Amino acid sequence: MVDDDAVTQAMLADELAAAGHLVDRAGSAEEAIAMLDKQIFDVAFVDMVLPGLSGARLLEILQAKSPRTQAVIITAYPGMEDAIASMQAGAIDYLPKPLTCDVLHDLVRRALERRQREARFTTLEACQEIFAANDPETLPAVIGRAAMRALNADDASLMLADGGHNLRLVWSHSLGGTIHAGAQVALGERVAGKVAVARRPMVVDDSLTEDPRFTGVAPPDRKIRSSIVYPIAVGDRLVGVLNASRLVSVGGFGPTELEEARVLASQAGVALEDARLVRELSARVSELSKAQSCMVQSERLAAIGQLAAGVAHEINNPVAYVMANLDFVLGRLATLKGIAAGAPEATAKDALWGFWQELGGSEGFADMDLALVEARQGTVRIRDIVADMRTLARADNGHEELFDINRAVQSAARLASASIRGVAEVRLDLGEGAMVRGNIGQLSQVFLNLLVNAGQAIPSGCGATARIVVTTRREGVKVIASVADTGVGIPPEVQARIFEPFFTTKSGSRGTGLGLSISRDTVTRHHGAISFWSEVGVGTTFTVALPLADEVPVPARAPASDRLSDGRCRILFVDDEESLRNSYQRYFGGRYDVVTVPDGRRALEVLAERCDFDLVVCDLVMPGMSGMELFRRAREQFPAVGERFVFVTGGVGREEVRKFLDTVRNPTFEKPFRFEQIDELLTKARPAVPV
């Protein structure tokens, strides 16, 4: 109550005191300011005309020092200008003297309700800010700053329970958000530790050493006017302790601030608990993701393990007869060489004729020719098996391309043939134009899994009735591929679960239950769908539907040649494998001018001497300077030669090779490749030159 009229001051103060309010009185603005430096008031009645500083000036100072105090201007000389100025300065009312008791009590009631609404609104804003924080790492800072605004504090800190016997400091305004390692308090020690154990909030001030509640507790490092130390708990679990302090702001915390702190602590506890659960859930999800990755890898290894013996059998068969046939031919050639070396020149013809007869004449040489043909067929078979395994290995590189779905089906069928042979007849009914876009290795793995499952679904002893039929076709804007078997079928009671991870009806040694789950995920990633039909005792059909890709792949450009004469073509072969260089020389040397070099450095030296080669056939992966680096340097030094490079590699699955090939349009062949493909390129590049 600020009024220089002692009678008015006493009358109003006595009336408010009689209603249960605590009233302090001041006779001047200076006296009121001194009181504001010591405490905060809920309501202030200020006379407009005061000695010294005016009531208007006091109102400005009051709003600066204690913005939540509700001010009422009273005056014996009411005027419109003063009324407007007072309301603009923050007064909630402007009334002429004298005030009746009813008006006085009504003013106090409205002022207290207004102050309570403002406090609730500020607390609500703080709670909304806390719940809007979606980053668990910054949540402590959000809680601390929100508490400072809601409680009109100029410092705050937050400590969290570590699950043991300590509180760990996670945020402090006075430390600028920087928390040093080891900043913690044991439960039961210092003010925060005692509040945590008691689970009751406490208000402390600078007389902490005289407070019997904190006997033996060391005083704070700095002077404080007032602090609220509030425990944060969710149910019976201690979450932490929130501390808000007034270091410069005047007045101690009272019941209103304690209620606001209660609401804040409750909401902060829920937010912190949610953040903890989110962190734990994220950690669990990460663990499950790692476990799933391990299981997926295990499933792939299991599938590879099942195929390994069969693939070895598939390779060993052609290797066996390739070696036998080559030994047969080499033996005959050795005999011929010995006869030719030991026979006198005059009788060489007779000796050769004798050898011809010894070999069985035309029939004997026909056997040698057949042996070489079969040997070549065996190497082609081995090449195809290696290519199929390489296709399967590409499932991990994430590389997408445009390809015919039949390639993935045929690759899977060749790899699965060893495990299915003797169990069922496999028929392929493949349509044309079934182009899709995606990872050929991943889709090949899908069909491999379906084929292996189909073979395992057919019981032994079925004989000629057992069949697995794979079909592909275009159907509108989709490519449809199906794998049908005449196996035992899937029981109706488990059909709803067959795509569930880890669900399997097989024994543990035959799978982990991830094959169909992985296949479904793979097809889904390719924007397709997988479904099935099954009947017990009849069989099962799995159908994969994928989007049809209409895009036509850009063909590799045939290397251009600037040699238009009828002279022989010139080819530079760059490969670190000596046997392969010798093969190049033997195959192409009779028809073309051939130069072979073992590395990129030597290739640059040759190109510096002459760069009129029609083709530069270059391995990409070599010791020292790689083919990729050679291509880069050759293109810089001899620009025209860059278009004549043809790349060959056995390491197309390597990341750096794949990225390089994505940037060039030069023809690329994967080892082993048909040497006739080089002839075909030369024909395209120089159609006028006979090759």
Image (cartoon, helix red, strand yellow):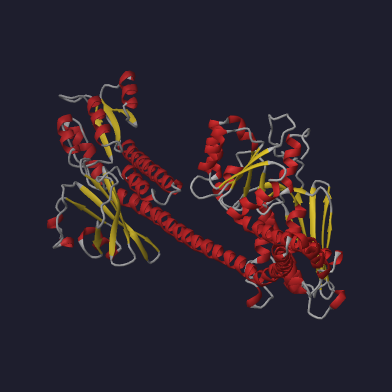
Place residue 664 in its image quadrant.
top right
**Residue 57, image x and y in percent?**
23, 25
Q: Does residue 542 appear in the picture of this structure?
A: no
- At a point 77% along the width and 42% down the height, the residue shown is 550
- Residue 383 appears in the rendering: yes
Tell which of 96 and 2 is nearer to you: 2
Q: Nearer the viewer, residue 260 or 25?
A: 260
What is the quadrant of the N terminus in the image? top left
**In the rendered image, the vertical position of residue 451 relative to residue 272, given as above or below:** below
Q: Give the left or right position of residue 451, taking residue 213 as reference.
A: right
Residue 329 falls in image quadrant: bottom right
Q: Position of residue 66 (x, y in %)?
A: 26, 37
Residue visible at 55% across and 49% down? Answer: 621
Relative image position of residue 104 (x, y in whole percent): 31, 37
Front-most of residues 127 and 478: 478
Q: Position of residue 200 (x, y in %)?
A: 29, 61
Residue in the picture at 29% in, 58% down: 168
